[in-house]
Amino acid sequence: VVETCIQATPIKIKDFRSSGDAGAELIFYGRVRESEGGETISGLEYEHYEEMASLQLQSLAVKTAKQFKLKTLYCVHRVGYIPIGDASLYIHIFSKHRRASLEAMEWFIAEIKKEVPIWKWGVKTDGSKFPSKSK
Amino acid sequence: MTVKIKLFSHLKYKLNAEYIFIDLSDQATVADLKSKVREIGSSRIEGIPYRVAIDSKFVEDSVKIHPEDIVALIPPVQGG
C-alpha cells in the first residue's frame, strides 16, 4: 500500500491494521521548531507547487516502497501556515523486518528534501514572512 | 513566443512576483530561458540556484520550450 497526500489541514495519525507479515512499524513526525535561521517565529508557512509536488511525492513513495520492499508507506505533508509544535510531515511505514523500515525512512525523507517542490517561509510574530534558508 | 513562468520561494521574494513573462524565439531551449532570466533578474537573483520544470517535470537545458508549456523555476526545495 502506497498512499501520499498534501493537505492544508492538521495531520492526524492513521490507524493501520498491520498485515500478518509486517514485523516492523515505523512512524515519523516532522514538527515546526520555534526559530528559523536564528529568527524567533510563530510558525512556518509551507509553499508548494501543487500539481508537481503531488506527483513527485507519490512517485518517490512508490520508488521507496519498491526499493526497500515495504508493505506500506503512508505519507502526509501539510502545507500553508503551521504553528510551532505542529507536524508538517507524517510518514508511516510497515516492513517485514526493521532494517528496511529504518533505511527507507531516512532515504525517503532525504529525497523529499531534494525532489518535492515545497518551500518554507518563516512567519514572525508580527505576521511578516521571510523565505527560509534552511533545508 | 511569450512564456509565462511561475516563481517560488527566494525567486518570488527577490523579484516580488508570482510570475514573469519572457519573450523567446520559437526554437528556444531551457538554456535560452535561463539566459533571459539572468538578464531580467540581474543582481536580484544572482546566486540563487534553480532547476526548470516543464509540465511538472524537471528538464535539462537542451529541452525545447513550446508556447503552451507550463514553466516553473524551482529553487532548492525544503519540504519536511
Image: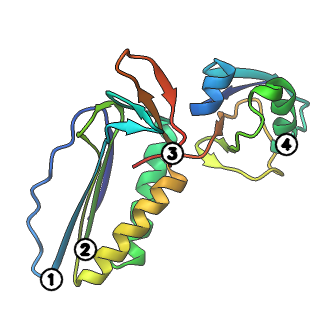
Task: Give residue A71's mark.
Answer: 2
Mark closest to the chain's N terminus, 3 or 1: 1
* Quadrant holding the N terminus of chain A: bottom left
Q: CA distance from mark 3 to mark 4?
A: 31 Å
Q: Nearer the viewer, residue A46 or A23?
A: A46
Q: CA distance from mark 3 to mark 2?
A: 32 Å
Subunit bearing disc 3: A
Q: Are marks 4 and 2 on the same chain?
A: no
Q: Are marks 1 and 4 in contact (CB under 8 Å)?
A: no
Q: Quadrant of residue A88?
A: top left
The three-letter amino acid code for the residue at tag 4 is Thr
**Disc 3: which residue:** A134
Q: CA distance from mark 1 to mark 4?
A: 50 Å
**Disc 4: which residue:** B29
Mark 1 surroundings: few (<14), some (14-19) or many (≥20) residues within 10 A = few
Q: CA distance from mark 3 to mark 1?
A: 39 Å
Q: How many numbered marks have been drawn onto this rendered protein structure?
A: 4
